[in-house]
Amino acid sequence: MVRIEHEANELVMTNASKMQSEELVKLAINALEEIKAQDITTIDVRGKTSITDFMLIASGTSSRHVKSLVDNVLEKVKEQGVRPIGTEGMDTGEWALLDLGDIVVHVMLPTARQFYDLERLWQGAEQSRAQFSAEPGQEQE
């Protein structure tokens, strides 16, 4: 068994269901792209916080789209045996958060994203923008 501690919660996963952080990021990006998330950004926060390794930030076009984006990521990670720690904000859809332990997915309406400006908050952490045409192994900008 692999024991993972996340804040005050303790989560137990089998080795078979434990995905590498980078694989989980790719899976989440693909799920977001699949239903047309906008402006997907990945921020590597390893060494900057103990909460998570990566933050994914994306925008949805409406509150319904925000919820659908998070639901799609949730569905895809569950298919791979990943148990999410929790979700927040699904009731309003202005800003929804999906905590997967190694990555935290933030999906927001553009106005909320501009207001909270998480990219600026984590300035200095390594950031990359997802590209819809990116091939596996191809560098992202």
Image (spheres, rainbow, N blue to C red):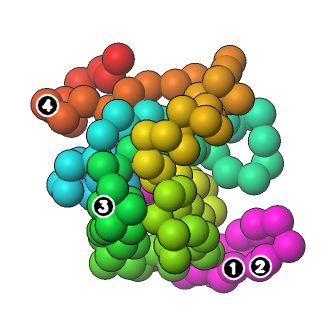
Asked if the residue under mark 1 is in contact with the one under mark 4, i.e. CB atoms within 8 Å, the reply is: no
Q: Is residue 70 visible?
A: no
Distance from Cα at disc 1 to Cα at disc 3: 29 Å
Q: Nearer the viewer, mark 3 or mark 2?
A: 3
Nearer-N-terminus badge (4/3): 3
Please name whichever residue, 126 or 63, is drawn nearer the observer in this view of the structure.
63
Residue type at mark 3?
Answer: His
Inter-mark Cα distance, 2 to 1: 4 Å
Per the image, the residue denoted by label 3 is: 65
Q: CA distance from mark 4 to mark 3?
A: 22 Å
The crowding category of the residue bearing disc 2, from other C-alpha atoms within 10 Å (few below 14, some 14 to 19, many at least 20), is few
**Which quarter of the figure has residue 134?**
top left
The residue lying furthest to the right in this view is 8
Front label number (1 vs 3): 3
**Residue at the image position 49 percent from the left and 40 percent from the top:** 111
Question: Which residue: 78% across, 41% down?
Answer: 49
Mark 1 sits on what residue?
11
Relative placement, left or right, of 65 versus 88 is left
Residue occupying image coordinates x 68% and y 18%: 124
Label of residue 108 in the image = none
Q: Is residue 101 left or right of residue 141?
A: right
Q: Could you say whether the residue bearing mark 2 is in a helix, strand or loop?
A: strand
Q: Nearer the viewer, residue 136 or 49?
A: 49
Whichever of labels 4 and 1 marks the residue nearer the N terminus, that label is: 1
Task: State the extent of the magenta-drawn residues as a range.
Answer: 1-26
Q: Any mark on residue 133, and which?
A: 4
Q: Which mark is residue 10?
A: 2
Crowd rating for badge 4 (residues with CA inside 10 Å; few <14, some 14–19, many 20+): few
